[in-house]
Amino acid sequence: MALAAGVVGALGCSEDPPTGAGTQGTGSGGGGASSSGTDASASSGAGAGSSGRCVKGCAAAAECCAGDPQCPSSAYPHNPTCESGHCRPGQCSATSDCTALGPNLDCLLNNDFKACGIVCATDTDCPQNTTCTGTDANGKKFCKGMSTSKECSTDADCTGRGRCADGSCVCDADDDCTATGVDKCLK
């Protein structure tokens, strides 16, 4: 179930898909599952106009496996892809991909990205610190995180995944992405 928690975390804090975060370490938008991996944007200060996030660059899907011995594969969650020169986490294709990881999981679609999430009817169906407030593109309700904390307060908080701008880790160039597992600034 630990894997399921990582997959669920990708959708848990945002209704946007985890375009960069994932269970395979295929490039995350910040420090982990709590940052949904979606584009972060700066709206003021020195970083005004920045909207990049650090990801892992690639030429083939095998480069996106982050040591997973079952990867690359066509089976979820061991199916990351290399798209436009950067890694994207594996996507589920059916409910059965998710129920194999946990009985309350379903394959949810958001912004053309499919990820497992905990489906719900009421808040009592959700784990602590989440509520039944998410809705995917197909109308399925899912548990969504209640965190309002910022990803960062200083550049050091980004630990090599860009610089801090308005509470989000963002990048302007590949040189901003120095953490292990990321080497490209995706805008």
Image: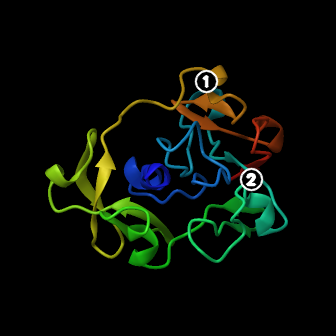
Residue 153 left/right relative to 119: right
Q: Residue at x 75, y 35 (%)?
A: 179
Using the rendered view, name the quadrant where residue 58 is placed. bottom right
User: Looking at the picture, which amino acid does disc 2 mark?
Assistant: Gly
Residue 1 left/right relative to 141: right
Q: Residue at x 65, y 28 (%)?
A: 46
Counting from the top left corner in percent of width and height, residue 111 is at 47, 68
* Residue 109 visible in the snapshot: no
Counting from the top left corner in percent of width and height, residue 114 is at 48, 70
User: Looking at the picture, which amino acid does disc 1 mark?
Assistant: Asp
Using the rendered view, name the quadrant where residue 63 is placed. bottom right
Q: Give the alpha-carbon distance from disc 2 to disc 1, as whole Å.
A: 25 Å
Q: Residue at x 53, y 37 (%)?
A: 43
Few, some or many residues within 10 Å of mark 1 (<14, 14–19, 20+)? some
* Residue 88 visible in the snapshot: yes
Residue annotated with mark 1: 157
Which label belongs to residue 67? 2
